[in-house]
Amino acid sequence: MIHDVAQVDADGGKKQLKEEVRQCIRLLIERFWVTREDDEELYYLIKDNEVEIKAFFRDTFRYRLIITHELAKLEKVPVNMYNWMGNKEIKGQTIFRRQRDFVFFFCLLAFLEGKGKDDQFSLQNICEAIQAYYPQVNDDATLHEHVTIIWKEGSGYQNRLSLIRVLKYAIKMHLIVVVDQYIEDFAGDSSHDVLFERTPYVTYFLRRFKDIFSWENVDDFTQFLEQENSEYVEAKHRFYRRLFLEPIVYHHEITEEEQDYVKRFYYAIENNVQKHTGYEYERYKHNSVLTKTLYVQGEVVHPAENMLTNLILRFAGYLLAHSAHDSFSFTKAFDLSHHEMQQILSKLKETDGRYWSKSFKQMTSEQLRVVVTNFLFNWNFAEEKDDKTITIKEGLFRIVGHYDADVSLDSKGDKQ
């Protein structure tokens, strides 16, 4: 049964969950962590209500809540891994653009692990550390080719830009702070130096794994994740983990045990979600989603007030109105080739282009296809079938849109 953390008064009646507890739970879910430095009031609210908050996360998710003198962090463990989970963003913009960015970032983390709290170091120290920690090419069991990271001319410029992106993200996450000089100057001068300082948050950035040194590749991590979600948690916990970490949960994609839990405890789930987070739980015949009635600027939501969301809603509406797929229904997915997507997006550009922003107007049909496809994948509205085809899933059609024919545009092409 759902654990009820409502307090009991002296007369045996249940008190309503305090709004401050609900706020703490919600923000711990939404944020990577809460630091005392950035949000002292929220940090102490969490500490003051630690017992209730920990009970909710333990009983609902089997999640661990870490509270130290510097921060509070909820360790969120997914059931499945998705590419979008690796997105690193600053102000809503994806900052890591290449595989090399991720490699540099983990080299930086390895370097910071060897530093103590408040230790200072230079940008050139980081460059040397990345060279030392960078993975070496292993073509066979006997040959190891040393990889040299160039920071000067030629490919060095792209490496410098990559490192700048990594350092900006590390600063945004409070892993390091700049003591002197400007990071951006490194782009034009490989000898430019910057003084940094390590923060106490580095220790808690990565989750600790006791068996990590026995892993050889990502498949070992995947196996560990599957084992953790099957041996150490129940169907209830797995469903809640998916519900809160994934954009949409398709019932045919979860285990029979989880499906049974949803059918039997639908109202309990709805009450639990509303009571402890303020979100709305919506269960349909074939899927479950969480929605928010209010959101703050900068949150990643769908639909949002931007050009890409408008295009996605319009794309979904077009598919519904012009679907040539006889097999389509809300209980089935259907395949769409890259060529078909390009044709649809080209038609939408012709009919709706006057409503589009300048950057979208300038995109080719292939560029539009890539942008739309990435969005669909990130929101689990589609999945890749092969290198030329994607499978459209029913979640895309929960909200569709069209442009009102009466909408007028001003001289700049903006809607009035």
Image: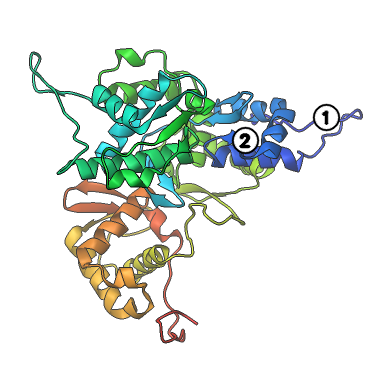
Colour convention of the picture: rainbow
Query: Which numbered circle lies on residue 89?
Result: none
Q: Left or right: where does residue 411 sit relative to residue 49? A: left
Residue 156 picture location, percent across and down: 20, 40
Amino acid of disc 2: Glu
For the point 19% across and 58% down, the residue is 337
Camera-nearest residue between 220 and 307:
307
Rounded to the nearest angstrom, the CA distance separating label 1 from label 2 is 34 Å
Instruction: Provide the residue designation for mark 1.
Output: 8
Tell me where residue 132 sits by quadrant: top left
Q: Left or right: where does residue 179 sit relative to residue 100? A: right
Residue 99 picture location, percent across and down: 25, 38
Is 150 situated above or below 137? below
Q: Element under label 1? A: loop
Camera-nearest residue between 338 and 234:
338
Cβ atoms under marks 1 and 2 closer than 8 Å: no
Camera-nearest residue between 80 and 109:
109
Residue 255 appears in the rendering: no
Q: Mark 2, residues whose alpha carbon is within 10 Å: few (<14), some, or many (≥20)?
A: few
For the point 44% across and 65% down, the residue is 306
Q: Which residue occupies the extreme right position in the image? A: 11
Q: Element under label 2? A: loop
Is 178 situated above or below 354? above
Q: Left or right: where does residue 170 sit relative to residue 125? A: right
Is 295 situated above or below 214? below
Q: Left or right: where does residue 392 sit relative to residue 412? A: left
Amino acid of disc 1: Val
Residue 249 picture location, percent across and down: 45, 44
Instruction: Provide the residue designation for mark 2.
Output: 37
